Amino acid sequence: MFNSRHNRTALLIAPLLAALVPVPAAAESPSDGILFGPCPADVTDNHEVQCGHVRVPLDYAEADGPSITIAVSRIRASGPPQQRRGALLVNPGGPGGTGLDYAESKRAKMPVEVRQSYDIIGFDPRGVGHSAPVDCGPAGGLFEHPRPDPVPTGAEQEHAYLGDLRRLADDCARNIGPALPHINTTNTARDMDRIRRALGEPRLNYLGVSYGTYLGAAYAAEFPRHTGRMVLDSVVSPDDWHHFDVRQGFAMLEQRDALFDWIAAHTEIGLGADRRTVREHYLHARSTLPVDEFGPDEFDRVVYRTLSRTERWEPFARALSQYVHTGNDSALRSTEPDDHNSEAALRAVKCADSPRPAIPDALGAVRALRAADPQPVLTGLEAGTCAFWPEPRETTRLGHPHMPPVLLTQAEHDPTTPLDGARRMQARLPQSRMITLDDSRSHGAFASQHSPCLDTAAAHYLLEGTLPPPHTHCTDLPHP
């Protein structure tokens, strides 16, 4: 098991740091700023996007100790100089999501006035991508395919489930090594302030999506007087990560019922005309797996991703129908490769941020979800791994009495970051306002679901600093 004591020497840490993937030398930065240059080839070939890096301490309690580099990207504001409002740092979520390329992809969806007024700044958080990436090695068999059925149904399978979590925790601790306790949200927030300073900005303007909202709330807790205009989209609850994962698991069951109802309303898909029949086809398909390397675990991961965004419903439904009627699973399979780095960073951050669950609680969550539905989707229960790690060095603080009001944007029925948790986070952020996108079941709202009402209000806030009235609702979203 991992030793959480943090008085390790630089000699122990140095081999790890030597293996980190740097941003190319052309992007080397001086101590008082960022020298931007071409981006790595795996990020973008768009010459409008520039990359650089900021050097930060691995451990902020030892500022003169070993350091790592945080990769940063930038696209300049497209408007005239007098229109510029500053820099807008963006984060796509995760934990474990790469952000170096997100400046380009998210900017393309933003209202034109925002693109004209802000330099859009992306970054890979520590432990991710080009910023000292971490890896859990074999990760307890997480990347072996096909994986065993992830839903334990008896004492023997529950024992095996806990054994898999322990092996995953041990592999992460062994392969990440002494850096493990430093890959957390609070340190990433501190890195964000180093980016702000290197850019020469008096305040951090910020757009965070999903986990990025949690990261934004952590920044405001650490640097309330440097917090600028902040849009938190699809908001993570302030609960500890294990409780968040469990709440998400129940929301996914509700979302799956909604998916079944939608499929039933589209009888041309060929999976039945009522929820019960659609569910029977779904369960039968799952029970016939594995086919080659595609088994129940891989199937559940595709379902989990499908449930997060309604535009994925029809492709999934048609792929499921094809498999049910022909046995052809080619359209059903995920084409996304395993992301070893993202999976490692996801667990490292969650386990470093909040108190670990007890082992009985990790198993109790599975039993509670099985009691609600015999065939739950357990893909999002990543924090169960934390039961086998030491307690974190510092838990994440969220919000601050002296921070300015910020804007939250939220889909009403988002299953990935449920609305009740978003409201609890709002209570941590004094005088903040929330725009709710009524009837939406997708994860991601601002510059994502094409709601003129929500996008206009969020853009107005970013440009003028004016918050919408309390309890603002947008109703201009078509149903899936």
Image (cartoon, rainbow, N blue to C red):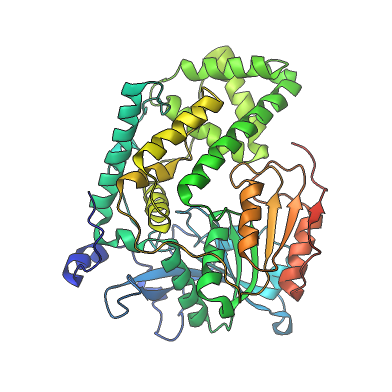
Drawn side of residue 68 relative to residue 35, left or right: left
Q: Is residue 38 visible?
A: no
Residue nearest the viewer, comparing 119 with 157: 157
Residue 186 is situated, as x and y percent measured from the top left of the image, at 44, 66
Residue at x 31% of width, y 22% of height: 156
- Above or below: residue 246 compared with residue 131: above
Residue at x 66% of width, y 68% of height: 430
Count of numbered labels shown in the rendering: 0
Residue 1 is situated, as x and y percent measured from the top left of the image, at 22, 48
Residue extending farthest to the left is: 11
- Above or below: residue 127 compared with residue 381: below
Residue nearest the viewer, comparing 319 with 307: 307
Residue 104 is situated, as x and y percent measured from the top left of the image, at 58, 62
Residue at x 35% of width, y 58% of height: 392
Residue 266 is situated, as x and y percent measured from the top left of the image, at 74, 23
Residue nearest the viewer, comparing 74 with 392: 392
Residue extending farthest to the bottom is: 32
Looking at the rendered image, the quarter that the C terminus falls into is top right
Drawn side of residue 273 relative to residue 289, left or right: right
Residue at x 54% of width, y 36% of height: 304
- Above or below: residue 33 compared with residue 176: below
Q: Is residue 71 visible?
A: yes
